[in-house]
Amino acid sequence: MLSILVLALLAVVLSICSEADAFVAAGLPQFSLTSRLVFLVVGPVIDIKLVAMHAGVFGKAFALRFAPVTLIVAVTSAVIAGQVLL
């Protein structure tokens, strides 16, 4: 579980392009396949620049509610898919 949370937070902080995150995930063989899947799913869904854009367009209150909910849904979906498929 710790590796899943670490890679989810790393995906948010790195804010890399969804085309490049597969290469980064491939370079992390010490992590489980499920945690790497979480990295691949969370990266394009929520990152720092998206939170800033949401705050600018919809307001800070919306961004502070939307970002955690989106992160939880993305991590949960990726973990469930990882458990079923991997």
Image (tube, rainbow, N blue to C red):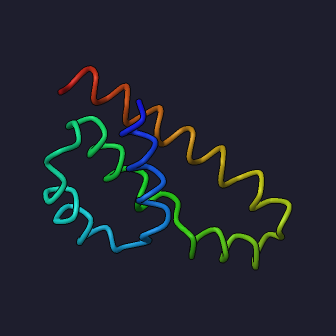
* Relative to 45, residue 59 above or below: below
Dividing the picture into quadrants, the one containing residue 3 is: top left
The answer to whether 21 appears left or right of 55 in the picture is: left
Dividing the picture into quadrants, the one containing residue 60 is: bottom right
Residue pictured at 69% horizontal, 70% vertical: 54
Image spot of residue 12 (x, y percent): 49, 61
Residue pictured at 76% horizontal, 79% vertical: 56
Image spot of residue 50 (x, y percent): 58, 71
Q: Nearer the viewer, residue 54 or 40?
A: 40
The answer to whether 4 appears left or right of 86 in the picture is: right
Farthest residue, direction top: 84
How many badges with numbers are in the image? 0
* Relative to 1, residue 22 above or below: below
Image spot of residue 67 (x, y percent): 65, 55
Q: Nearer the viewer, residue 16 or 18?
A: 16
The answer to whether 80 appears left or right of 63 in the picture is: left
* Relative to 6, residue 82 above or below: above
Assign the C terminus to one quadrant of the image.
Answer: top left
Image spot of residue 69 (x, y percent): 65, 43
Q: Nearer the viewer, residue 33 or 58?
A: 33
Residue pictured at 44% horizontal, 71% vertical: 15
Residue pictured at 20% horizontal, 37% vertical: 33
Assign the N terminus to one quadrant of the image.
Answer: top left
Q: Nearer the viewer, residue 27 or 86?
A: 27
